[in-house]
Image (cartoon, coloured by chain):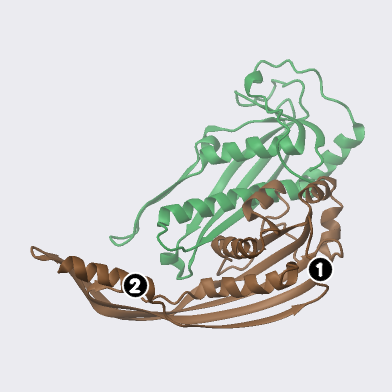
Chain colours: A green, B brown
Amino acid sequence: MQKLPLNIALWYDEAFSQHEFFDQAKGRSGSSWIVKTGEAQVDLWNTLLPGMFQQVRLLTEAPQKGSTIAGVDAILVPHIEELQYAIPAHTQIKVYEIWLRYRFELLSPSGAPLAEWSMTAYGKTPTAFLQSDEEAVNLAAVVALRDAGANFASQFRRVAPLQSWLANHLQQGTGPQQLSSQNIHSETALQTQRGVAQ
Amino acid sequence: MRCLVIIAAAFITASLSACVTSTVDEALFNSPSKGIGDATVVILGRRHASDYETEPGFIDCVGKHITAHDPSIEVIDELSFINELYPWFEPRTAPLHPQDIELLLQKKLVAQKLQALGTRYMIWIDGSTVRSDSAGSLACGVGPGGAGCFGFGTWDDDSSYEVTIWDFNRRAEVGRINTTASGQSYMPAVIVPIPIIAPVQVTACDSVGEQLLQFLSSEY
């Protein structure tokens, strides 16, 4: 994918980086479920975003209004708003499903809101011989995370609330200032060339 | 004595398989008469339907059938291919029509990667194998004198797959294969259960593999 000439700072709050979904069993015959996606979420976005943007830097402190982060064009903050799952026992269809709804915030380097939008992702996996429910739900979650990355990468330029900011920013071509903020963890700055093909 | 029964059951199990009925329809055009040469082939499963998924194991089986019968044909592993070209072959973004190839190749890095892989033919497989019916009952028990099962079970499996072959050079569809297979499996049990399995999915895999070999291989 042709990288956008943007320097993006990335902030994962605790709810995101340690995200887990718990569903209490509704009866004696049912079973409770915990779906932990936090670690995989962080791995996914840490891999995907450096393939999309010129530079991605990981913040170690939450962005705060009035405290400007120098050297970046914007701060991206992902949130998981909702997770739903379905297993064959619920739907009578021989597939396991995971559905995710994300909310993304794009903030200015000083923490002011620039745009906010939602995105969904879906993954499913068929039943298989000798495959446990846990393994199948895990596979469906992997597919859902891949779908999240595909959706974000292929639709980022088309997100309506972003378009004017993106157009203005890319037109101005003003490079970000020299990196100097202390809340950027240089060790974990994500400058890898891995990523997305276009 | 019991050991003898178990050995006999294992032997019978290994030597018995139930019948499978299979049908194949094919329409192939512009088959490469001298084979595909140095070009590579990728076989991908369609995963757009809401109630089923083309099994990755079936895709793997077809690829292995082709390379086992003509080792000169290089079949790229499905997962490696979609990882290499992420995110353009995910269910959400994968091309659905041959006309989409042109759009795909307009992405510079995608075109470069496909060229580096030497991919000439992209083969899409859409379908699944389902258990359509089952009957009977089987009970097993363990006691001080030993363990054993008694009963009879039977089930029907049905496979249905549609294969579409795209030629990257021609930017066109050059073939379509439909295959269906069905079979009934049995499991009688007198002390030891003896599964007599109808290899429905394997038969469908072999049928598709044979047709693809006729298209791709110069030796068929």
* Residue bearing the label numbered 1: B32
Provide the secondary structure element on which disc 2 rests.
helix
Can you say whether A110 is above or below B158 in the image? above
Crowdedness near tag 1: few (<14), some (14–19) or many (≥20) residues, C-alpha within 10 Å:
few
* Real-space CA distance between mark 2 and mark 1, rounded to the nearest whole angstrom: 42 Å
The answer to whether residue A46 is above or below residue B182 is above
Q: Residue at x 53, y 51 (%)?
A: A141
The x, y position of residue A193, in whole percent, is: 73, 33
Give the residue drawn at x 75%, y 39%: A52
Taking depth in this image into account, of A6 and B31 the one nearest to the observer is: B31
For disc 1, the chain is B
CA neighbours of label 2 inside 10 A, class few (<14), some (14 to 19), many (20+): some
User: Can residue A106 be seen in the rendering of this structure?
Assistant: no
Mark 2 or mark 1: whose residue is earlier in sequence:
2
Type of the residue with mark 1: Pro
Q: Position of residue A177 (x, y in %)?
A: 81, 20
Which residue is rendered at x = 30% and y = 62% of the image?
A: A29
Q: Residue at x 78, y 55 (%)?
A: B38
Query: Is residue A140 at all visible to an observer of this figure?
Result: yes
Amino acid type at mark 2: Thr
In this rendering, is residue B184 above or below A117? Answer: below
Residue B175 screen position, x and y as percent = 76, 74
The answer to which of A84 and B139 lies nearer the viewer is: B139
How far across and how far down the image is residue A137, in percent? 47, 54
Residue A16 in the figure: left or right of residue B123:
left
* Badge 1 element: loop
Residue beneath label 2, please? B13
In the picture, which quadrant includes the N terminus of chain A? Answer: top right
Judging from the image, mark 2 belongs to the subunit labelled B
